[in-house]
Image (cartoon, rainbow, N blue to C red):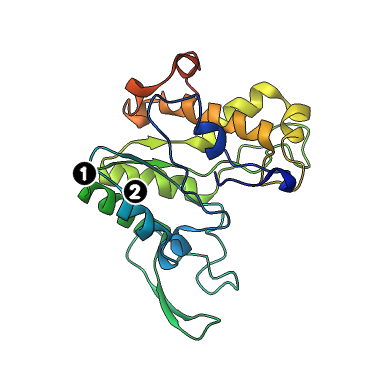
Amino acid sequence: MASHSASEGIQGWGVPASSGYFTLPVVNRAKSGSSARSWIRDGFWYNTRALLKSGDYVVIELGHNDGGGPTASTERGSVVGEGSETVTVRLKNGTTEVVHTFSYYIGLMINDALAKGAHPIVSSATPNNPYENSATIVNSPSRFEGYAKNIAAAKGVPFVSHYKACINVYSALGKATTESYFPKDHTHTNAAGATQVAIAFIGGLKCSSAKGVLSGYLTSSSAAITAKC
């Protein structure tokens, strides 16, 4: 989702989604390399929350960097599970951190957004290259897909399965085209791929779990995109 310079050869889907898809202004606050845990711990969420106004829509999409567990050297992993479990760890800088589950962090952001009068939308993480080392598409979502869906349902807020929507798009495009979108690694797309991932998000908004959110703010080009469920 995060913005990257042209020289990096990769681009996040939040960049194309910021122009031409919605009649509302779009602000891309994504930070490359963040997990739900680090997004909160390092202050990025609180900086975003401070900017929220009543009536704003907030897309919360994390999950790519949340694996590995709370003691992983990346200091990004969350506690496995969906409840109130915690693990206390000592970080490399010598400070102590109480690490929670992914669902706890997403739930906290949902609650904060609602408290500001904003409308949170939970979106699941997009797939890595689903054709990697395979002649056919591999549809194998991570546990964070279910975590995102479940916390959205528990909080009664819209959910976009961005993972499923992307699989839908990549299935139609086929192996050669899809793999051309992953020039650096199996996670990050180039600009052309980012556009397809943005299209997938629009298609995901048209599925029942999204509860019709943002349907009144789609441009004519977005209105022409079919549901990706």
Identify residue type, mark 1.
Answer: Gly
Depth check: 123 or 103 in front? Answer: 123
Q: Is residue 89 above or below residue 83?
A: below
Q: How many marks?
A: 2
- The residue indicated by pointer 1 is 117
Give how far across and how far down residue 193 sits, in percent: 66, 33
For the point 65% across and 21% down, which residue is it? 172
Identify residue type, mark 2.
Answer: Ile
Give how far across and how far down residue 173 sits, in percent: 69, 23
| Residue 80 visible to the viewer | no
Q: Is residue 92 left or right of residue 37?
A: right
Query: Callout 1 environment at 10 Å: few (<14), some (14 to 19), or many (20+)?
Result: some
Give how far across and how far down residue 60 sits, in percent: 41, 46
- The residue indicated by pointer 2 is 151
**Nearer the viewer's eye, disc 1 or disc 2?**
1
Q: Is residue 122 left or right of residue 169?
A: left
Query: Callout 2 environment at 10 Å: few (<14), some (14 to 19), or many (20+)?
Result: many
| Residue 206 visible to the viewer | yes
Separation (CA) of disc 1 from disc 2: 19 Å
Depth check: 155 or 121 in front? Answer: 121
Precedes in sequence: disc 1 or disc 2: 1
Element class at badge 1:
loop
Please report contact status of discs 1 and 2: CB closer than 8 Å, yes or no. no
For the point 34% across and 61% down, which residue is it? 83
Residue lying farthest to the bottom in this orientation: 94
Give how far across and how far down residue 190 sits, in percent: 69, 38
In the rendered image, the quadrant that contains the N terminus is: top right
